[in-house]
Image: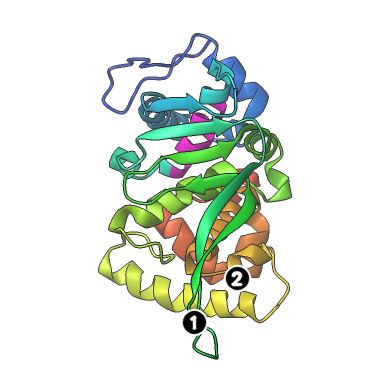
Amino acid sequence: MRFWRGRDGSGAAGRRPDAWEAIVDANVAMWNTLDDDEILNAVEAMDVLLSKRWEAAQGFVITDEHRVTIAAQASILAIALELSVFDDVPSIIVHPTTMRLTRPRAIGIGGNGGIGGIHAETSTVVGVAHDRRGPVLLAWDASLRGCRQPEHGHNVVLHEFAHKLDLLDRVIDGTPILDADLHNRWVRVCTAEFERLRSGAGSVLDRYGATNPGEFFAVATEAFFCRATRLRDEHPDLYGVLGEFYGQDPARRAS
């Protein structure tokens, strides 16, 4: 078993179970593309997430496999970021499968002066990232599928944790906290790419990214890590700004 030391050199394993490496090797395909330095940083980020509060829903029982698989995948986002990016993730709630959420939706005033009201709208989702210091909700079956088969381009863990990065400035607008120079280029590039996706142009990016700028960033993050070579070839400017933000070049790892 390899033992990876943290960035501070302490080598403390935190809350990692003894079998964590076997779990990662079996479930997190992307992990095997990382070099030693990237693994060092990913492990420290994983320790931060494993120290969060983990909760089960719908009678589910959380095991070390669930915690490690989800934390290891999310940690890849933070390989070159400050660990404080996870400060607003107080807990991770794991559901066994697709969740049904009911949210209130306002009904407008009628054309004849009728008074509007509130309608309960039900939707099915595999992940939710609550704002402020709210939890991340994940469906385990979808989480495992995305971790084991990144080539399909869908990864709910990366998607929802990307939303939490976006929310660090308290606004989910597709623009995380950036330095001034990158911010200007980010807005220009992402606005153009978002409009292109909304126009219906074919793309490696999932069409769900055309919903709004927040979903665009989360979908682009999935493509950046899961279909890096195609994203780089089809959308080089978008790949470039994502690479600067995340401090990574996953297309290099893929090749």
* Image coloring type: rainbow
Classify 218 as above or below 141. below
| Amino acid type, callout 2 | Ala
Q: Nearer the viewer, residue 158 or 24?
A: 158
| Amino acid type, callout 1 | Ile
Asked which quadrant contains residue 63, the reply is top right
Residue visible at 70% across and 69% down?
203
Percent x, y of residue 197 = 63, 74
Asked which quadrant contains residue 133, the reply is top left
Percent x, y of residue 174 = 44, 65
Percent x, y of residue 234 = 66, 68
Which mark identifies residue 15?
none
- Range drawn in magenta: 68-77
Q: Nearer the viewer, mark 1 or mark 2?
A: 1
* Residue 129 visible from this viewpoint: yes
Percent x, y of residue 187 = 41, 74
Q: Secondary structure at mark 1?
A: loop
What residue is disc 1 on? Answer: 109
What residue is disc 2 on? Answer: 210
Q: Earlier in the sequence, mark 1 or mark 2?
A: 1
